[in-house]
Structures are given as C-alpha cells and as structure tokens.
Image (cartoon, grey):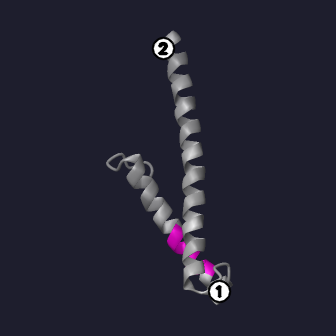
Amino acid sequence: MYENEKYSLLVQTLIHMSIGTIVMIIVGLYVGWIPLAYGLPNAICFILLKIAISLIIWYIYYLQNKKMNERIKNIQMKK
C-alpha cells in the first residue's frame, strides 16, 4: 500500500489507520479492552482517544522524517 504512488501519503495513512482501528475495535471488544460495561458513550470516547493518540504519534514521525529528508537533500546538494 505504501509503495503505490497513485495514492497520496494522506490517503495511504488513512487506509492503514482505518484497517488498524477496525481490527483494534474488534479485538478490543472481544478481549474486553473497550469497556462496554460503562456504556456506549465511554466506549466511543475510548476509540476516539485511541485515534487521537495514534494521529499525534503519526504526526511526530511525519515531522521527523520530513526533517531527515531535508537534511539528506541538503547533504546531496553540497556534493
């Protein structure tokens, strides 16, 4: 999926994140990670929190990779 250049990085990330989130919800409900005993609103909050944390982590890695690519490009231009 990430090697297919016809999709933008955003679309690739959203596809990957969607698949991961669906799997996490199914497994989380099965093994009890998602607390349905406290009501559906709490379960939805848990899922949204997971998505928000995942997006924050993705964005941090995105910024690191962007910075690293800029450094590599600058080194190559100096040669």
- Identify the residue shown where x is 31% and y is 48%: 6
Which residue in the protein does label 1 denote?
38
- Report the front residue among 54 and 43: 43
Q: Which residues are magenta?
A: 21-28
In this view, which residue lies farthest toward the right? Answer: 32
**Magenta stretch: includes residue 8:** no
Q: Position of residue 63 (x, y in %)?
A: 55, 38
Which of the numbered marks, if any, corresponds to residue 77? 2
In-front residue for pair 58/79: 58
Q: Secondary structure at mark 2?
A: helix
Q: Residue furthest left?
A: 6
- Magenta stretch, overall SS: helix
Taking 17 as reference, is 2 above or below it?
above
Instruction: Check residue 2 in the rendering and tell me which mark sits there, or answer none.
Output: none
The amino acid sitting under disc 2 is: Met
Res 8 seen here: yes
x then y, percent, for residue 49: 59, 66
Place of residue 52 in the rendered image (x, y in percent of width and height, measured from the top left): 56, 60
Looking at the image, which is closer to me, 68 or 3? Answer: 68
The residue located at (41%, 50%) in the rendering is 10
**Structural distance between the alpha carbons of marks 1 and 2:** 58 Å
Q: Is residue 9 left or right of residue 54?
A: left
User: Alpha-carbon neighbours of circle 2 within 10 Å: few (<14), some, or many (≥20)?
Assistant: few
> In the image, residue 70 lies at what x, y percent?
51, 26
Rendering quarter of residue 55: bottom right
Q: Is residue 67 left or right of residue 1?
A: right
